Amino acid sequence: MTDRERFLACILGRPVDRPPYWLFWGPWKTTWQRWKSEGMPKQFEDIADVQRHFGAECSPLIVPVNYGPCPMIEQKVLEEDDNYMVWIDGWGIKRRNPKHTESMSEFLEFPVKDRDDWERFKAERLDPHHPQRLAGDWHGQCKEWMGKGLPIQLGSYPDVGVFGGLRWLLGDEECLLAFYTMPDLVHEIMDHLTDVYLAVFENVVSEGVRVDMIHIWEDMCGRQGPLISPVHWNEFMGPCYRRIKSFADEHEIPVISVDTDGNPDLIIPPMLGGGVNYLFPMEVAAGCDVNVLRKKYPNMAMMGGIDKRVLAKDPQAIDRELDRIRPALDTERYIPDLDHGIPDDVSWGNYCHYAMKLKQLVGKD
């Protein structure tokens, strides 16, 4: 089977020779530095080199068009010292980051504080039909990928998300409060972001690109569960997802995926109702058990669910973790992989052991 055929068969529950072998999640920058000091081949430049080294297959490739703010917002450093950097990112968010460790940003300021800010940002950066959205030779790249039998996706982190986009614009706490204090604005923002995504998607498929998956980044869950209720998901996000599902059906795009950290259990039912059929990364630290969730939601394909923290222990612990998730493989619609990026307490030797054992688990020669 080609990489595309195997991916689609696995996700859609069709006959398949074995699950895909991806090594999807890469290392932190500090992990990469550690690996270089521990014997990783010096010529390796990025995770793609590591994936090729272990014979991993190709996960869906992102059509490289502009789904987010356009014209793009220039990322720039506002101030820095020996330990921290304050900067503006591609969504206009002011962040503070440590310079020598891996950490989430401290979010200092978001671009939208009220309706006037939203109207200004929408007019300046969210024209669905801005010509720069389709700049570059993306069509040539997609033609090459199609010729090689590789899976192709529309949408990616951090620029395609219904809740994710709202969060980037308003801020974490601010957007949650807005569901109660400014519900009309929340609806309007989510609806317009969906307009942008669908306009870009339409332009891509109209050029003859064969798309296999639409990907939506949300990151809308924590250890305690979703950041909004299933009722709010249905009310605010459901209409947007159904529009995306309608587009996917019209253009024979079989997979709609969502990436959210944390535990999404409570919102999996409304996601299924909205057309989502593939979910990751199934974070173990948040209480996700792919053995349980695959049985509970047999029509929701999943990827991930292997506890990244175990890779910091020893080969025996890694083997036990792979044995733990083995029952999920028997349910089909499951791609075994880590549950997020690889921390810097993971040695190169342990990662090599994991990569080889995962390869054996999926049955790749």
Image (cartoon, grey):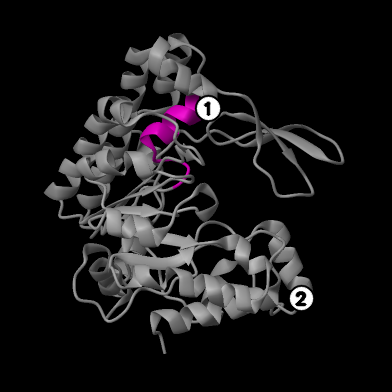
Left or right, residue 95 beside residue 119: right
Which label number is shown at residue 172?
1
Residue 61 appears anywhere in the view: no
Task: Name the spot of residue 193 as percent of width and height, x first.
Answer: 34, 30
Which label number is shown at residue 38?
2
Task: Name the spot of residue 125 as percent of width and height, x first.
Answer: 44, 27
The magenta stretch is: 157-169
Left or right, residue 53 beside residue 85: left
Q: In this rendered view, identify the residue nearer to me: 187 or 75.
A: 187
Q: Residue at x 31, y 20 (%)?
A: 187
Q: Residue at x 72, y 38 (%)?
A: 97
Contact between marks 2 and 1 (CB within 8 A): the answer is no
Q: Residue at x 20, y 36 (%)?
A: 243
Looking at the picture, which amino acid does disc 2 mark? Glu
The extreme right residue here reads 82
Task: Name the spot of residue 98 as percent of width and height, x first.
Answer: 76, 41
